[in-house]
Image (spheres, grey):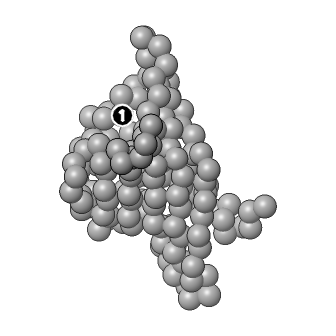
Amino acid sequence: MMNDLEQEMWDFLHRHIQSIFSQDVATYKATTAEDLSLYEWFVTPHRQDGLDFHLFMIDHSWAGTDSDFRYDLWEPRVQIYGEETGVVTAVVSYTFMLSIATEAGIQHRSHNESRVLIKDANGWRVVHVHKSPTWRAPHEPD
């Protein structure tokens, strides 16, 4: 069972993710730190810093979500630290699955994802994102 802080954090995270796929730039900016760092294996093998890249992608409907879409967070986990300090840090991890309804049928994409969030006097913000593929590692046997 979730406590109030965990529920608040998950509600925030869903609002943040929804802003990306619904092209809500104002909410994305309000829920993301300006010094965001992220690793997206499917974009580049290098770290990306700042908001400019994602703002460009959101403006150009990068996710192909002009159609109907939904996302699911499988096996969600949250680790919360620093509640007593006034600045709370949360590490969330899950498998992200995006389902998009297109004229050709429903398409699915998934990846593993971790996000680091902070909460201070200004509220929650995403400060770091790390995404990795969901397929088996090449060194694993069949």
x and y percent of residue 24 in the render?
41, 43
> In what quadrant of the picture does the N terminus appear?
bottom right
Whether residue 135 sits left or right of residue 74 in the image: it is left
Seen in the picture, residue 105 relative to 22 is either above or below; the reply is: above
Corner quadrant of residue 38: bottom left
Q: Would residue 81 be visible to someone looking at this image? A: yes
Which residue, as the protein is rendered here, is positioned at the far front? 141
Element under label 1? loop
- Disc 1 marks a residue whose amino acid type is Ala
User: Looking at the image, which is closer to me, 105 or 126?
Assistant: 105
Q: Position of residue 12 (x, y in %)?
A: 56, 57
| 133 lies left or right of 78 | left
Rendered residue at 43%/16% (across/down): 102
Which percent across, then down, holds residue 23? 38, 39
Residue 26 visible in the snapshot = no
The residue sitting at the right extreme is 1
Where residue 77 appears, x then y in whole percent? Answer: 60, 59
Q: Which residue is mark 1?
A: 63
Query: Is 15 located above or below residue 103 in the figure?
Result: below
Q: Residue at x 62, y 87 (%)?
A: 84
> Which residue extends farthest bottom?
85
Position of 30 compared to 11: left or right?
left
Check disc 1: other Cα within 10 Å, few if <14, some if 14-19, many if 20+.
some
Q: Count the marks: how many?
A: 1
In the rendered image, the quadrant that contains the C terminus is top left
Residue at (50%, 44%) from the top-left corner?
96
In the depicted view, which residue is nearer to us: 40 or 69?
40
Q: Residue at x 45, y 23 (%)?
A: 107
- Examine the image and state in which quarter residue 133 appears: top left
